[in-house]
Amino acid sequence: MSYSKRARTTPRRIRIRRTCVAGLLVVTAAIAAALGYQLLTSSSSTAASPIDVLRGEHRGLRSEHRGALGEADGAVPDGATVFADEIPGVANLDPDLLRALRQAATDAADDRVELFVDSGWRSPEYQNQLLRDAISEYGSEEEAARWVATAKTSAHVWGDAVDIGPFNATAWLSQHGDEYGLCQIYSNEPWHYELRPEAIDHGCPPVYADPTHDPRMQAAAVEGSAGSPLARRD
Ligand SMILES: [Zn+2]
């Protein structure tokens, strides 16, 4: 694996935590409401998609931190496209991934679909902030690990992953992404895309149920467990 060579260093930033807490309460309330709704409707297989619920939560975590860690750490403002060179979360993506995204976005535009970047490259500080918040959201490291990777394991920190929105854009990518080498990696994250160049000829590889099934996560978690409680995964 040569991911480490892509690791980027960014200056440490001062975190302003007060704004996080307020945002977190709102997000928590929304999740509680959503989960309650899911329980009420779980007897029907056509109930509101849990993915929509989870996606909303994912976005909540993202936007909430816009004020805590800024654009320089990878926070992406609403409405950023894959062409937004002035936004580090977009500009710091792997050049091959960015090229593929721009080709896809150009072709998607012909179908009147616009690809927006909800999240792209993230600094290690930003990733760890997301993970800490996810742990307090979900109540355990184990559950949080299904949704948020550590700074050592996240493909976002390497610049190798992008979260695309809105729904019609991910729907378009799920149909055409492999033509550009753009693949969904996790079944529970239909917005998360990475570059798999071999997909152009062979199609995308099977998805993992969630990040905990991704061998990259497991290897890096063992490797990086010393000294960081966030990196440990039993
Ligand atoms: Zn992602």
Image (spheres, rainbow, N blue to C red):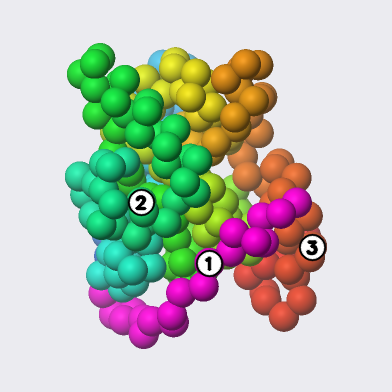
3 or 2: tag closer to the N-terminus? 2
Binning the other alpha carbons within 10 Å of mark 3 as few (below 14), some (14 to 19) or many (20 upward) gives few
- The amino acid type, in three-letter code, at marker 3 is Val
Residue 34 picture location, percent across and down: 35, 41
Q: Is residue 139 above or below residue 160?
A: below
Corner quadrant of residue 7: bottom right
Task: Determine whether the residue tagged by mark 2 lies in a helix, strand or loop.
Answer: helix
Q: Visible in this render: residue 190?
A: yes
Q: Tag 1: residue type?
A: Arg
| Residue that carries the numbered disc 1 in the rendered image | 8
Pinpoint residue 114: horizontal percent, then vertical percent: 24, 29
Q: Residues within 10 Å of mark 1 (few under 14, many from 20)?
A: some
- The range drawn in magenta is 1-20
Residue 21 in the magenta stretch? The answer is no
Between residue 226 and residue 5, name the one nearer to us. Answer: 5
Toward the viewer: 50 or 187?
187
- In screen coordinates, is 171 left or right of 143? left
The residue beneath circle 2 is 90
x 73%, y 61%: residue: 221
Q: Is residue 28 above or below residue 231?
A: above
Name the quarter where the C terminus is drawn: bottom right
State whether label 1 is within 8 Å of ligand 1. Answer: no
Q: Amino acid at mark 2?
A: Val
Kindly identify which residue carries mark 3. 222
Is 19 contained in the magenta span?
yes
